[in-house]
Image: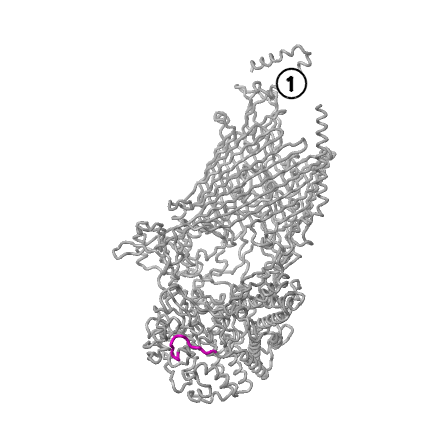
Amino acid sequence: MKIRLQNWLSSCLPFMKLKLVHKLIMCALLLIASIGVQAQSDVTVKGVVKDTVGGLPGVSIKVSGTLRGVSTGEDGSYTVTLPRSGKLLFTMVGYKPKTVTVADFTPNSAGIYIINTLLQSDENALDEVAVVGFGTQKKASMISSITTINPKELKGPTSNLTTMMQGRVAGMIAYQRTGEPGSDNAQFFIRGLGTFGTGKQDPLILIDGAESTQNDMARLQPDDIASFSVLKDASASAVYGARGANGVVLITTKSGEAGVTQFKIRSENALSANTKNFQFADNITYMKMANEAALTRNPQAGLPYLQTKIDATARGDNPLLYPNNNWIQQLIKDYTINTRNNLSVEGGGEKARYYVSGTYNIDNGLLKVEGLNNFNNNIKLNNLGVRSNVDINLTKTTTASIRIFGQFDDYTGPLLGYDENGKRQGGGQRIFNQTIWSNPVLFPAMYPSSLSPFATHALFGNAVTPNNGLYVNPYAEMVRGYSESNTSTVQTQVELTQSLDKIVKGLNTRLMSYLRRYSYFDVSRSYNPYYYSATEQPDGSTGVQLLNPGGLGSIGEVGTEYLNFVPGDRDVNSVFYAELAANYNRTFGGKHAVGAMLITTMRNYLSGTANNLQLSLPARNQGVSGRATYGYDNRYMVEFNFGYNGSERFADSNRFGFFPTIGFGYNVSNEKFFQPLTKVINSLKLRATYGLAGNDQIGNASDRFFYMSEVNMTAGDYGSTFGEQYGYTKNGVLVTRYANPFITWEESEQINLGADFKFFNALDVNIDVYRNKRSNILTPRTFIPATMGLQAAIRANTNKAQNEGIDFATAYNKTFGSGWFAQLRGNFTYAKSAILINDEPTFPSNEYYRSRVGQPTTQEYGLVAERLFIDDNEAKNAPRQFDGTPGLNYGGGDIKYRDINGDGIINDQDIVPIGLPTSPEIIYGFGGTIGYKNFDFNFFFQGSARSSLFINSQNIAPFVLNGGSQNGLLSAISNSYWSEENRNIYAMWPRLSPNFVANNNRTSTWWMRNNNFLRLRSIEAAYNTPQKLNQKIGFKSLRLYVSATNIGYISSFDTWDPEMGGKGLGYPIQGTYNLGLRATF
Amino acid sequence: MKIKNIKINKIKGNIKGFMLASCFAATLLSFSACKKYLDIVPDNVATIDNAFTMRIEAEKYLFTCYSFLPKDGDPFYNVGMLSGDELWVPTQEWDFVSYAWRGARGGQNSADPYMNAWNGSYQGGGPSDRYGLWKAIRNCNIFLENIKDETKVRDLRLDERSRWIAEVTFLKAYYHYYLLRMYGPIPLVDKNIDISATESEVRIKRMPFDECVNYISTLLDESVSNLPVIITDRTNELGRITRPIALAVKAKLLLMAASPLFNGNSDYANFKDHDGVNLFPTAFSADKWKKAADAAKTAIDAAEAAGSKLYEFPGSTFKLSDTTNLQLTLRSAITERWNIEHVWANPNSRTDFLQRTAMPKLATGGASGDARMQLAAPLKIAEMFYSSNGVPINEDKIINFANKYTLRTALKKERFYVKEGYETARLNFDREPRFYADLSFDGGVWYKYDSPSNSDENTWFVEGKYTQMAGATHVGYYNETGYYLKKVVDWNMVNSTNGVTYRDYPWPQIRLADLYLMYAEALNESEGPVNGVFEYLDRVRKRAGLKGVVESWNLYSNNPSKPTTKDGLREIVHQERGIEMAFEGSRYWDLKRWKKAAEAFNQSITGWSVFQANTADYYRPRTIYTQNFVAPRDYLAPIKNYDITVNPSLVQNPGW
């Protein structure tokens, strides 16, 4: 240090001749210059930046007056070199900036300055901003109900962001129904389901202002997220006009920070396993009960399984002749390994800054693959994402942001299926379904190839069904082929911001536009398996017989040894969007804060895969929105928002709608009279908003133009044929939609009351209560009698629903002495819906319960099951159930329903609302972080309450042969069922049957279960390497962690994971056990 | 210099900012002018107007109106076939779920009625339930409104225009008639109600029965004059409506209106709508029978003038016995395409499925679904057919059927009816030719074109006992009574190793024999046993190889005076009609309009013990089901409760 000072002095010598004043100035200048050029004279400063919770990663540390800067590592540690006289400026979104003068500290023995500092997390910071619709707003003056989530909270061992939201966002109802890679998006609704029309119910998702799908959001990496806001009330979402009524999720991605290039890497390896597999009864029980099922319905019936077969199976005789399969074990692996990697680079200078990131995730399925084919029919989802955000200062007042991202999913897996709505669904779902929909004892998965030495194909096991078909062999279904699908999204976005401060102080304009292309396709390749059945030869050996060789006597689909190609679905679309906005923000006289925003937007969507003329036309939106705010002395705030926009879907006269809102805020804690209380209540703000928002995504996608009729001029079903040889055929004409120019969007009238507290500088509490009234819900008119002869429903905006509830969020932050810190948070969402007006006929007074008015929008309707009939005689003397014949269609051991309207017949008129809604009314979560020095431990519990689950009894009805599918036997059924010996009228399963019993398959309280659960959603234990070690290995920071998700749950329902609701036979939700590291260098 | 630069930059910045701001302001101002941005729909998107611009498009709409004609050639959609007691299907509803048959088993209900033609549900709307009849009527009205407007479809010739109008007027009448037959009094929709009509406008009422009949009859009269007498362009138009068809339907309408169910039925004396209007005629009117007779005669005359005759088999290249040739006459009267007896055949309802469900399995090979033999005649229907003497089996004084369930072995002379040497029930011997033409049974001969002997000797016959070829071994493709339905299966049906071929035929909606019997019935009711009655009855009997009514009863009946009284002759007419029209879906409607359904449909359905392999066991009559018909409720179909809730102006049928 001394030597360096001397050098510097000597470098000053040539100037000594000049005037002293000049000399001094020049030296000072040189001093400054030399700092910029060389660092020899610098001191090293190290330390840890913390907030009340613990180490803060990502804090930007700038050396005042220079471009030099670093940011803190995972544990909040940093190292920076600067002149001893320099100052460090610590900044971070959500915290008060802090300046530290190095000279105020003394170096340690090694000459290093240790500067640990605490940043004040202060949401009431006057300059703190939050992302709101089309802009940002100071949090202190924010009136709308907006939940902002720290992106850190969304980090978890999953490659699907949507699965991280359950219980973490106050005001969001979210649940995940399946765990299949590629299809595992959680469903989420803001403040519950506000509408019960057929249209869009989920929120508008905007990523950097670009309308995005749930899949886009799912693939977004939390590492790339700068902010995550959920706009909940009309005041927040009105600027989105006719698209905002379901709430809005606003996400912005990170921009580059000027400074030295910084690399961040995250790499994780996770073990993923089913949270719960369904449990089968053993196969001896299966066969015995199958026999019982046949006999109990028809004492003369032939036995499906001979006692000799049962005995031989029990003894474990030749498994080719006496197969004993547990398809779950044979098809499904115990676990699979997934990897996730994310790398980002950021940096730049005054003119331009960049943030570039890349993601590569691999998610594997749980299907067992043996080397039968050279193709992989397990699920493998490769997800590649690239994002480049560049900000350029074009002039001093103009900045340009160019954001480009590409998102690519490559999927291979078993043959894809379609769900009940005809949408593509993952092949894993199908395989899981088939593990239960397959007979376990009739054939093995495969015979050894030695049994048919000349066959050049695999010898799959099968048998002939009573109706001369083949059974489903789930193993063959799994390995017979594979599907590939590719999804690509590419988007380029340009945003220009022009400050007009020079013309009008506080005014700036912004132009943003993006172009987005999406494509999806899938192809499937499969062969038809050759099926064999085994027979015992006279010499006692086992022989096999080919069942489907083709030709006479061949059964089922004829086998092929070669792959067939099936062209799959394609989806191509393009979106162009532009918005032009002006923003004005200025404070006059220190007390009068005035803000205004005005924006016009236009959007054009074009699908390249529409299958009719009307759908092929572009979908467009256009609108003007605005916001005006006024705040007085940070105490009284008023805000006005509006959206005025339209959609091509509606008739000219109803095309544009106006959605205004007004809101008031009152910072009580800024009042003088409140001052005595501020020791306890540090801040208190009261908010109230009222206004309208709309939803134009109503009806089905195929109902684009309500104001136009749609006519099929070549409807084959409505044609006729004449002529001696039936030679003259003409197709007919079918009206598929009648023109209705009056149809318009749904309108949501929303009122929100909120209060934000902070107690003891540690405990934050936010409460919002709200009531939304959704009107103009599109529904078919029910007063149209059949005698009108209409061939398409007439619909109108008649229905109305209400949603009300409470969002509650709390957070507690505290740092204790001796290195301990704790952060606890919890939130609670309660959303209850009720139908206010339903277009329905006037039901007679004894059937008042058939009216949906007053019921929740997702209320399930069904029969009230009293119990099981004791015997046929009781059934004969009870009210007749549907048009069945007691003793024939139903009888003892079948479900006895209640005759609600007392007309002596059980029929559809006895259907009442049963249970709670299928979508939960309460979602809550709580968790926290506890840390000690370099260690921290996170945990998070999440719960769901007030919903019902309905078992689809057909899906699990044992022994029923449905096509080639013959259901297995769940142990839940074998443990509790009605039998002639044990007439348990409250058994879980009614009397067994080899056929579907329509009487028992109806939706009823019998199949209703409480769907409440509380699950340990995640835990994480992490170790942040100490600074010394980091320097040795060349990292700025390094965090090693183990984490796990979906570790366990408490629920009264135990047949499958309760979160899956009624879809329990699908691909189960995954529990993951993860090992990861995050490093900055 | 630096200062200058800054200034320039500043000015530049200002200019840029100003330009941006101006652009922005301009965009905002021009916004209202941009409303066209949302006008994306190009011209020429198809609307209903496109259907009536050119003849070629309008013809599609004409065919649309035709497409709603009930598919009576299909056992699922012909209400009469399985709703009553004439045919029975396997109890195990495997691959054969018929709601008509569920109705026959007492399942009819008002919550969700079966064979609901009103809404088009539960098979009442035809395939996929897409053809609810009010929809049909709306389409007819749309067509008529547009085609009657001569400024539309300018390239349509006037004569063709009036023919099309007549055809659709007929269809509109027919759809109303079909509903009237099923529900009794119905609302009449002469003009379509606009889509934007208010609640009160759409709530239309049921009209009194006579008014309905008058309305339909007027529509038919309107159509008659412009309909062609015969179809001349057989290649392209055969199956379209002709004048004899319209007259025949009118005869059916008036016969129904004259029948006891609708003519002075005291059960419905108090059936009124909400305004107190009687929906049923309270007093009996003999004049209605007269009108029915006249209408039937007019229809017969028109049909005969157009060339209709009772069908006779012209013979074939094979050398066949007279017995077999008579059999083929009787069978082909139904199954021969477009034969001269078919007054109205509907090419849009063909019969492949009907034949497949009727045909027993006679040969090995082929898939089990090729010959499903599900349609089965109960024993009482088999017993309904006359003895070989042409009188009821319980009246025959020559041939004794007292031991009808005992066993007998077929003699050589009986080999064209029953396999020689085969042991079967007494009931299956000494029966009239129509018995053997319409039905087959265990041991019964089933002559087909592909007879292995190329003749009617040593030809196909049915083996129906359990474990036999046509036995009840399959889970769902079996015959529940042991009487297989031969009448509807064309004799060109072929079984080969490549599978099975049925030669389909357009379903005969109305046959001349039907008109003859209708006339005989109406004439007897209005004038008693006059010559005209016997003349037309005997034409049908003669074709079936039987002697005339008077002669047969004189010679063979133990009740020879029966044909001499109106009441006695009525019984004879009814039975003759039951036999001649068997399995065509007529019996169910006939028994209802005669008010005899309560008697017939409250009996047991019986058949042989088809699950027995042993001959003696097999021929034990077995009760399959005991029907329950609630009178007067079940005479009229229920309107779905929901429709009554939706339209409170409707009244529900009595008892529902």
Q: Taking A296 as reference, is A523 above or below it?
A: above
Magenta range is B311-323
Question: Would you identify the image quadrant in which residue B384 lies?
Answer: bottom left
- Residue A768 visible, this angle: yes
Question: Which quadrant of the figure has residue B259?
Answer: bottom right
Residue position for label 1: A29
From the top left corner, tell me how far across and down residue A1029 is, in percent.
48, 26
Residue A443: % across, % down: 35, 54
Q: Quadrant of residue A78?
A: top right
Q: Is residue B207 above or below residue A326?
A: below
Q: Quadrant of the N terminus of chain A?
A: top right
- Judging depth in this view, the residue of B61 and B421 nearest the camera is B61
**Residue situated in front as seen by the camera: A969 or B593:** B593
Colour treatment of the image: one colour
Q: How many marks?
A: 1
Q: Considering the whole magenta stretch, tell me its main secondary structure.
A: loop
Instruction: Using the image, determine if residue A967 lies above or below residue B617.
Output: above
The x and y percentages for residue A58 are 56, 32
Q: Is A29 located above or below residue A258 in the figure?
A: above
Residue A493 located within the stretch drawn in magenta: no
- Chain for disc number 1: A
| Whether residue A167 can be seen here | no
Pick out the residue farthest to the top.
A17
Q: Amino acid at mark 1?
A: Leu
Query: Residue lying furthest right in this view?
Result: A589
Q: Which residue is at the front of the view, A226 or B481? A: B481
What secondary structure is marked by label 1?
helix
Left of A504 or right of it: where is B302? left
Residue A572 is situated, as x and y percent measured from the top left of the image, at 55, 47
| Badge 1 density bin: few <14, some 14–19, many ≥20, Cα 10 Å | few
